[in-house]
Image (cartoon, grey):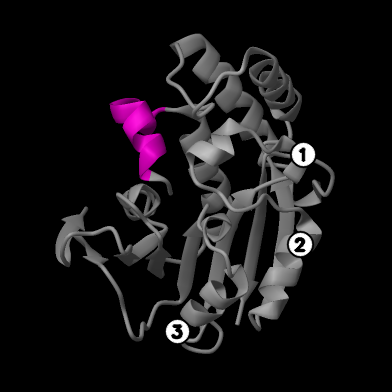
Amino acid sequence: MDLKEEEILGEAIDSHWYYTSKAEMMAAHLRGRSYKLLDVGAGSGWFSRWLLKNDVASRSTCVDIGYPKDSQTEINGKELCFKKAIDQSDADMILMMDVLEHVDDDVALLKSYLDKTPTGTGAFITVPAFQFLWSPHDEYLEHRRRYTIQSLTETVVGAGAHVQSIHYFYGGVFPIAMMVRLLNRITGRQGSDLRPHGKVVNSILAGICAVECYVMRANKIAGLSVVCLCSR
């Protein structure tokens, strides 16, 4: 996750429709087991914390070159570690939540972490969708690219992994986002599109995404994110 977004949202991130919907979407894919997570490019570890709190993970190691030092804490009695780098991991699920779009060689980054884990380890990946949605939001967050199902599939296969499920998400709010991006181009607005919302707007957008979770695996058409579950 991007720390710039967390700085914008502050404490509102814990109830913001975009993050809570992404977490619920991820849990819909992963529920049924309690994973040992390797959260790559984790930033503050928001998604790991959410999964630990909601019993989708038994422990998590967050890796991010931005950490000043290695540290450790607990969430509901479960281990949560923060490390600047790792050599090997016994994790059975890698998280890359909006990470691959930040690097020049996405195949190499994904492969490097798959190679650090046992055969059969899964990877849950989200990336921003569709290059035509490129905007100052992407520039502010220092993205290199946006993806389609096809381009993310090529990245995953190139890294030596097998795609188990891939689809778009935030399809229900896709038309709204397109209008916002168009208005921003007209007005010249800079920076991130994310911002805190009032309870009514937040509830409506979260509700749209909650309904989408029931049919998301069939969405091969449109969305703001590409979501992939794969394994090495």
Which residue is under mark 3? Answer: 117
For discs 1 and 3, the disc positioned in front in the rendered view: 1
Comparing 110 with 134, the one in front is: 134
| Horizontal and vertical percent position of residue 62 | 32, 63
Which residue is under mark 1? Answer: 132
Task: Give me the C-alpha separation between circle 1 and circle 3.
Answer: 35 Å
| Horizontal and vertical percent position of residue 18 | 52, 33
State which quarter of the image contains the C terminus.
bottom right
Task: Give me the C-alpha separation between circle 2 and circle 3.
Answer: 24 Å
What kind of residue is marked 3?
Answer: Thr
Image: 104 above or below 157? above
Q: Residues within 10 Å of mark 1 (few under 14, many from 20)?
A: few
Q: Residues within 10 Å of mark 2 (few under 14, many from 20)?
A: some
Comparing 64 with 225, the one in front is: 64
Residue drawn at (53%, 42%) of the image: 22
Image: 207 above or below 169? above
Is 31 placed left or right of 129 in the picture? Answer: left
Q: Residues within 10 Å of mark 3 (few under 14, many from 20)?
A: many
What kind of residue is marked 1?
Answer: Phe
Comparing 8 with 202, the one in front is: 8
For mark 2, give the secondary structure. helix
Q: What are the residue bounds of the magenta stretch?
A: 3-15
| Horizontal and vertical percent position of residue 31 | 52, 58
Q: On the image, which quarter does residue 34 sit in? A: bottom left
Task: Give me the C-alpha separation between circle 1 and circle 2.
Answer: 14 Å
Q: Earlier in the sequence, mark 2 or mark 3?
A: 3
- Name the dominant secondary structure of the magenta segment: helix
Disc ID at residue 151: 2
Q: Is residue 215 visible?
A: no
